[in-house]
Image (cartoon, grey):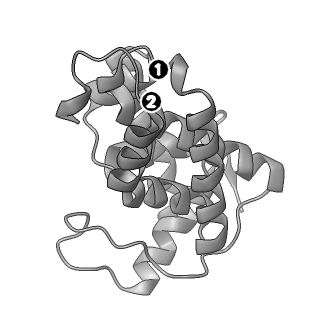
Amino acid sequence: MRFLEGRGHISEQEFAALMTEYRQRFYRIAYSYAKNEHDALDIVSEATYKGLKHIRSLKEPSLFLTWMTRIVINTAIDDVKRRGRWVALEDGMVEKQGLFADPPDEEILFDLYSAMDILEPEERMWIILKYFEEYSFSDISAMLGEPESTVKSRVYKCLRRMRTYMEGGERDGKSGKRTV
């Protein structure tokens, strides 16, 4: 993205080149919400349209990746809300080098996705950005306009809820009551 530094705007051709460069990243984010290829591609397509439509609102072209990631996440969250529920994992795992030292077996992956399903879409975003997309706490803070301490607090709260679920039951996260 070096060609964007010091520029005031992004042309449609540059937008297309950047979308091509980051398409796998955006797809992984969308897939982690949709859990199937078709819906993930729809989310990326809709986010691409929104990004292109609002490209002039991007004040600092060097922040394209952060800006577009946020559009993809918001589009994915809207899609989940529109469908009103999480769908079952259909196509297996989305591969990403470096995410796991050894690929997890399907049972572990299913358990992980099941634990993520207890989170609200907005909560799920924290886990995806930190552990699937490997953003630092400070990067997430800048991306979402939240204090770094808030980002850490929300990520760790989500991890505690997921761990509780995986250890044998879900806690609602507010009262601490266990649900079956």
22 and 78: which one is in front? 22
Amino acid under disc 2: Trp
Mark 2 or 1: the one toward you: 1
Residue plotted at (51% across, 76% down): 110
Residue plotted at (53% across, 63% down): 31
Residue 165, image x, y percentages: 54, 59
Residue 116, image x, y percentages: 54, 57
139 and 16: which one is in front? 16
Mark 2 vs mark 1: which is more N-terminal? 1
Task: Reply above or below: 140 against 172.
Answer: above
The quadrant of the picture occupied by the N terminus is: top left
Residue 108 visible: yes
Residue 176, quarter of picture: top right
Q: Is residue 133 left or right of residue 13?
A: left
Task: Reply above or below: 147 against 144.
Answer: above
Residue plotted at (42% across, 72% down): 94
- Name the residue carrying label 1: 58
Q: Are marks 2 and 1 in contact (CB under 8 Å)?
A: yes
58 and 16: which one is in front? 16
Question: Are there few (<14), some (14-19), or many (20+) residues within 10 Å of tag 1?
Answer: some
Question: Are there few (<14), some (14-19), or many (20+) residues within 10 Å of tag 2?
Answer: some
Separation of disc 2 and disc 1 at Cα? 7 Å
164 and 107: which one is in front? 107
Question: In the structure shown, which secondary structural element does the residue marked by tag 1 occupy?
Answer: loop
Q: Is residue 10 left or right of residue 164?
A: left
Amino acid under disc 1: Leu
- Name the residue carrying label 2: 67
Question: In the structure shown, which secondary structural element does the residue marked by tag 2 occupy?
Answer: helix
Residue 45, image x, y percentages: 61, 54
